[in-house]
Amino acid sequence: MAKEQLLSYEDALDKFEVVIGLEVHVELNTKSKMFCGCANVFGSEPNTNVCPICIALPGSLPAVNRKAVESSIAIGLALDCQIAPTGRFARKNYFYPDLAKNFQTSQYDEPIAFEGKIDIELESGEVHTVLIERAHMEEDAGKLTHVGGATGRIQGAEYSLVDYNRAGVPLVEIVTKPIFGAGDKAPELAAAYVRAIREIVKAMDVSDAKMERGNVRCDANVSLRPKGQEKLGTRTETKNVNSLRSVENAVRYEIQRQGYILANGGTITQETRHWHEDRGHTSSGRPKSDADDYRYFPEPDLVPVQPSKEWIEEIRASLPEMPSLRRRRLQEEWGFAELEFRDVVNSDLLDQVEDTVKAGAAPQAARKWWTGELARIANAENLVVQDLSITPLQVAQIQKLIDAGDLTDRMARDVVAGVLAGEGEPAQVIEKRGLKVVKDDGALIEAIDKALASQPDVLEKIREGKVQAAGAVIGAVMQAMRGQVDAARVRELILERASK
Amino acid sequence: MTELVFKTAAEIADLIASKEISSQEVTKAFYDRAEALNPQTNSYLYQSRENAMAAAVSADKAQAEGKILSILHGVPIAVKDNLTTTDAPTTSGSKILEGWVPQYDATVVKKLRASGLPILGKTNLDEFAMGSSTEYSAFGPSRNPWDLDRIPGGSGGGSSSAVAGHLAPIAIGSDTGGSIRYPAAVTGSVGAKPTYGAVSRYGLIALASSLDQIGPVSNTVLDSALLQDVISGHDPHDSTSLKDSLGSMTDAVKNADVKGLRVGIVKQLSKDGFQPGVKACFDDTIAKLTAQGVEVVEVDCPSFEYAIAAYYLILPAEASSNLAKFDSVRFGLRVAPEGNPTIERVMAATREAGFGPEVKRRIILGTYALSSGYYDAYYGSAQKVRTLIQQDLEKAFSQVDVLLTPTAPTTAFKIGEKVNDPIAMYLNDVATIPANLAGIPGMSVPNGLAQEDGLPSGVQILAPAMQDAQMYRVGAIIEKLYTDEWGSPLIAKAPKLEVK
Amino acid sequence: MSEITPDTVRHLASLARILVTEDEVETLAKELNVIVDAVATVKKAVSGDIKATSHPIPMANVYREDVVEPSLTQAEALSGAPDSADGRFRVAAILDED
């Protein structure tokens, strides 16, 4: 398909106001599915987590998973929503082979949660309040595989195969109200919003929140209107935006694409579009039409959800600290510089650093371990740092030995290597590898004196007060001591011996 | 023991319990007769001697071990072919399901098996239970044992003709607008629709989920009571299933006492539109009750005027959605159209070929009633009529214990007489529909033969929701008044079917 | 009267995924008009502030606990399918994207 023409981003922003709306689907991590007892797990053999309900055998009936309702209410509360005294399931009727019943059991005019808000902070520090229209419960569809044809894409496929393992997995769809006033930051805000939702549901442990697995998915609505115009422009809905980068790029692309059309006197078709990350553009899906007459009506096989005040309050009380508040608190407690803290956040290492600090390490030391040495090792081994086989407690234990002068930095890195190699707890590794700081200064002083004697020019400089010259001697001393001394102590003693 | 097949289920159960006969003897007797007569009545779509006899052997074995599994232990039964069975094809009277053997048993079927009732076969019905004559069955109409040229009622005409013709002692039916009660009335048998939710719908191929209810078909009120006691009870697989037991229907029948009974006649269902002979039978029932000292008053239910209209909006709407799953993907028929067979075209061609004209009519009508712009006027208004009917009934039941109406406006009509006139067909259910709309229990009991054609007539008893026992009590009272007069149940007057 | 035109029937049949011939369109339009005229009386029966009844017996809050129960085997799941391959239900190619 030919790429559409684009207006430059600056020109588009100059002429038009951007309005976005975001629909985020969150797959809940309940043990069983939304309406039946089949396992809610990823990656099973096709059609092995299915029952008469998931494959819509005639006569089967749904039964609502209490935990899924609870998680949905929790998400609503976390987004500052009101919880409906009466929520109702409804059928959304349309034919598609991944939808076994050919209707999706969803919610329509009586969603479980509505009228919420969330503050989203951008890179620049500016904060946007995004209003939430509703959060409702529904079920996921099965998975289609298109076979034949050149690309494995839907066009040109000879036939398709359907796996209903995912059919009936509980979803919460969170819908924002139209978001105005983000200007050129609209794409960034869209991505930051999705990131925030992802962090929240992860912190709450109601979803695995892995975007690469489709646990969190986003549909982005974008419309433009000439500046000063009251009426909203025609919007497009871009589906299949399943990474934070895609969200940002897709919104940006739509702004430029629509900008070009409008700037040239054209009109926008209200339609579904698809984002292609590989090719960096959206393509037209089908236009909104009569086929979108979903004929919603109350699901007669299910009864209303009327959560009691007590239940809602119980759920509210069990909510964890929200990620943005937690970040603010931790940054303050730890006293990190802005960049240092952002590095921890962006590497998703808050939990590790916090647990290491809780286990007794100083915040800066904990941060350095996780974003420094450990991140380096993980990177070299093509792992994510969270998957390394070392615990925050172990890191803290090692750091305490450094602080006590029992390990040098180099020795500590050896201990870490040993732990990662499966040699046991830090103490065992130290024992096995014979890593112990030499605390008897006699041998050290001897080595220092020898080194100073062999470098009289350095000795001279130190005596003239150029203390940084000591560095040239430290290396030689460390080598002589086979690294089993603390560099800081070496430096201290060099200055002391030089002054004699 | 050919007389065995003319005994009631209660009598058979007693003979088995007292070891005078075995379940195998009874099952064989009924099976032999059903096999011989089915070519005349077309009551059964599927019969399996092997399945029936295997279940009878199990029942006898259990009894030999001292286990009486239920009050109907060993009594064979026929099951309407819209309940799923793992050992027999289930068609719901439609070509679209021909040959499908379900992967699970309906809850009611499970209960029958666990209660020691051998299943003789699956009985005929109008396609997807849409109809009141079985003429809309894809597998030909069933025939009324009183006159083989006449309809046995519908949709459950297979079950009613099987029971009235003694091809089974009892049967399971389903009632969405009268599909148990109407066939009972026109075949001189007994049929009850319990309170909505009293019997699990899990495994009942849904017609209209908010109206469907499974119930018993028999030749006596006691037999229906025994069967309702066996099949009712809470089922977690059906979210609309009642939590609490409604008590013993059997006890209600055995202890039936006329003392203090107050009966209401619905003004709107006692005047026009009834065949004179049917009206005469009804008046006779009222006269008999009055003679017993029963207080009879006329009650006003003005919204009953709109019941048929509301019903023919709600039913098609829910059915259009329930029947969407018949799409050629996971079970049932698949028809490949000529040319480029995309999934959309395969689905449309399959549904064209697999559904009969009445089913298509109702699906399209239901699609219309739910479509955007019409929902409020049609489906929405119909749901409000339901509220009005409930209000009328609430008022009526504040004055009386039960309501009585003629069950059907006419006696059995000739096959072919109304098949091309949907509206005339719909009017057969005028008296039975309000019970489904309001969820209340209703039953039909024979009350004589119409003088003009000598065909059976039935009286309908309606009781408040959850008061099924009250309905059975009155059913037993009326039945006794007639058997006292006739010296036997009405069914004994039916012509004897002869093997040709 | 005549609310249901042949075009309406074509549209509804397409929403309901039922292939209809032109003859059927005409017949269905006629039949449905009769039925719609009959059922349209519900509009007269109700005024604004009557609540809708979607469940005949009022109930709420019916849940199952979040417990995994046995599923069908793959062979059982596919046993009724007109066509299958690689453990999945096989269907004709899908025309429209989405």
Image (spheres, grey):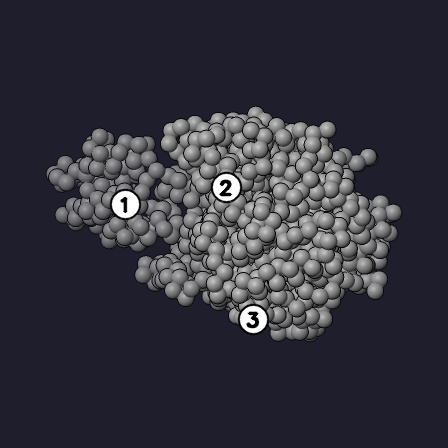
Q: Front-most of B147 and B392?
A: B147
Q: Is residue C45 above or below residue A222?
A: below
Q: Are marks 3 and 2 in contact (CB under 8 Å)?
A: no
Q: Give the amino acid at mark 3.
A: Lys
How far is the residue under mark 3 from the one under mark 2?
37 Å
Residue B350 visible somewhere in the drawing = no
Q: Which residue is mark 2?
A: B10
Q: Chain of mark 2?
A: B
Horizontal placement of C43 versus B226: left or right?
Answer: right
Q: Is residue B375 above or below residue A1?
A: below
Q: Which residue is mark 3?
A: B395
Q: Residue at x 63, y 32 (%)?
A: B34
Q: Give the amino acid at mark 1.
A: Leu
Horizontal placement of B35 versus B395: left or right?
Answer: right
Other residues around mark 1 within 10 Å, as few (<14) / some (14–19) / many (≥20): some
Q: Which mark is residue A393?
A: 1
Q: Chain of mark 3?
A: B
Give residue B107's position: percent from left, percent from top: 51, 42
